[in-house]
Amino acid sequence: SQQGEEDPQALSIQEGENATMNCSYKTSINNLQWYRQNSGRGLVHLILIRSNEREKHSGRLRVTLDTSKKSSSLLITASRAADTASYFCATDAHQGAQKLVFGQGTRLTINP
Amino acid sequence: NAGVTQTPKFRVLKTGQSMTLLCAQDMNHEYMYWYRQDPGMGLRLIHYSVGEGTTAKGEVPDGYNVSRLKKQNFLLGLESAAPSQTSVYFCASSYWGEQFFGPGTRLTVL
């Protein structure tokens, strides 16, 4: 079963605009991670936020986590054509083995 | 450093054939994972390993076997391939938190 549910499933915006993707999950977590996947490639780690953190920044990325609502959001500011990719949230609810459970992803398209 | 590598990149099998996918990492990570990704889906965990000589089942282990004889290698085997195993297979490794992914193996079972 997939823990994370991303919303929207697809998002198309103009270059320069901000893109926001949401992720909801079902059980308590140790941390939540966001990954990017370019077409036909492996996943690349973007950011990790721990369960005791509420917000984290990395360059143009801003991630929030609300454990009371079991939800997270990924904001990409000033989008670029190179940001076109699928974005996945993944939750880690286990001690030790760091088993991730991935959502189905948001397909982001940046139009020039 | 090469990171995580996977061989082969592509493979076509007939139903009932067997094959082994190889994953290698040069980052000295303890944890290694095998996932499958089906069209429009996220990744689902097949098997994982928390160290040399150990393996454990993930979410979708049926029809697959794994071995971790050396710390840097994690093998995924299909003993009798079925069309339902047509997918893209990703290997990953980690020390803590962030997982590093290989480029994937696209497998088609006819």
Image (cartoon, rainbow, N blue to C red):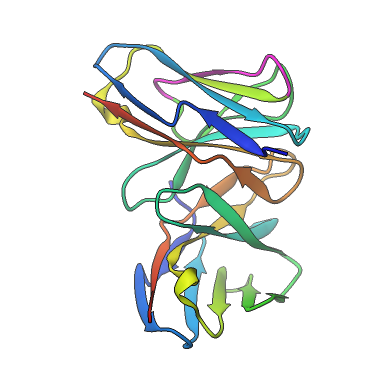
Question: Which residue is rendered at x = 60% and y = 25% of the image?
Answer: B56
Q: Position of residue B76 (x, y in %)?
A: 51, 22
The reply, left or right, for residue A37 in relation to residue B27 is left
Vertical side of A13 occupied by B98: above or below: above
Q: Position of residue A63 (x, y in %)?
A: 63, 74
Inspect this view and state whether residue A26 appears. no
Inspect this view and state whether residue B31 appears. yes
Is residue B82 inside the magenta stretch? no
**Magenta range:** B62-71
Q: Position of residue B79 (x, y in %)?
A: 39, 12
Vertical side of B105 occupied by A28: above or below: below
Q: Position of residue A17 (x, y in %)?
A: 47, 88
Q: Residue furthest left?
A: B110
Q: State the image quarter where residue A85 is shown.
A: bottom left
Quarter placement of the C terminus of chain A:
bottom left
The reply, left or right, for residue B91 in relation to residue B28 is left
Vertical side of B20 occupied by A20: above or below: below
Q: Residue furthest bottom?
A: A17
Question: Which residue is rendered at x = 24% and y = 26% of the image?
Answer: B83
Q: Nearer the viewer, residue A28 or B87?
A: B87
Q: Nearer the viewer, residue A93 or B41?
A: B41
Vertical side of B15 occupied by A70: above or below: below
Question: Which residue is rendered at x = 43% and y = 68% of the image?
Answer: A84
Question: Which residue is rendered at x = 41% and y = 65% of the image?
Answer: A106
Badge count: 0
